[in-house]
Image (cartoon, rainbow, N blue to C red):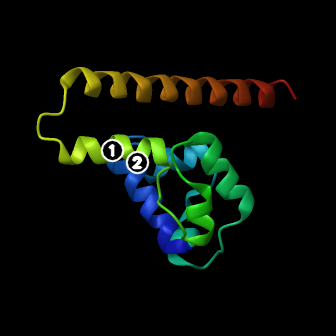
């Protein structure tokens, strides 16, 4: 399971969902040392972490992360990415739409983080 976690982290960085491991930690609200232990296999990945990944990165297939069955990306995302990788005449408009969607998701994640920080400050 830890190799799958590492694969997810690599995918998120390469697809620019996160800038780096620190960005992933910030979005997830996890300590960098904890994520390092997850990657190394020193800590098992809990179902709550898998749920958090699903909430923050809905294209990731939580069942795959947990069991290894199926594909890392949910079907809809997987098909889109396969087309992007194999279709040489990939339409620029589709690329722009996908980038706008990724940007929208980032904005939503930022909004969630701001709400969380605000709620913590008000305690």
Q: Please, which residue is most extreme toward the left here? A: 88
Say what secondary structure mark 1 lies in: helix
Picture residue at 59% right of the left edge, 41% below the top: 56
- Answer yes or no: is residue 61 visible: yes
Residue 20 in view here? no
Q: Looking at the figure, which quarter contains the C terminus?
A: top right
Q: Is residue 71 above or below residue 117?
A: below
Q: Nearer the viewer, residue 32 or 89?
A: 89
* Residue at x-position 51% and y-position 64%: 70
Query: 122 or 63: nearer the eye?
Result: 63
* Proximity of marks 1 and 2: CB atoms separated by less than 8 Å: yes
Q: Residue 114, how many percent across, how many down?
A: 65, 25
Mark on residue 78?
Answer: 2
Neighbour tally class for label 2: few under 14, some 14-19, many 20 plus, Cα within 10 Å: some
66 in relation to 100, above or below: below
Q: Could you tell me which quadrant the N terminus lies in?
A: bottom right
The residue located at (46%, 41%) in the rendering is: 76
The numbered dot on residue 81 is: 1
Pinpoint residue 42: horizontal percent, then vertical percent: 60, 79
Residue 66: x %, y % from top left: 63, 67
Q: Give the secondary structure at mark 2.
A: helix
Viewed as shown, does residue 34 lie left or right of 103?
right
Label 1 and label 2: CA atoms lie apart by 5 Å
Q: Is residue 117 left or right of residue 67?
A: right
Crowding near pointer 1: few (<14 within 10 Å), some, many (20+)?
A: some
């Amino acid at each position: 399971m830890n190799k799958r976690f590492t694969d997810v982290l690599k995918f998120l960085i390469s697809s620019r969902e996160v800038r780096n491991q620190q960005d992933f930690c910030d979005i997830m609200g996890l300590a960098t040392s904890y994520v390092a232990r997850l990657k190394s296999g020193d800590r098992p990945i809990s179902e709550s972490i898998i749920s958090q990944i699903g909430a923050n990165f809905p294209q990731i297939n939580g069942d795959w992360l947990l069991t290894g069955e199926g594909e890392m990306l949910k079907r809809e995302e997987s098909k889109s990415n396969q087309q992007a990788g194999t279709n040489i005449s990939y339409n620029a408009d589709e690329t722009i739409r996908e980038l706008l969607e990724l940007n929208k998701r980032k904005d939503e994640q930022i909004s969630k983080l701001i709400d969380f920080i605000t709620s913590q400050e008000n305690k």
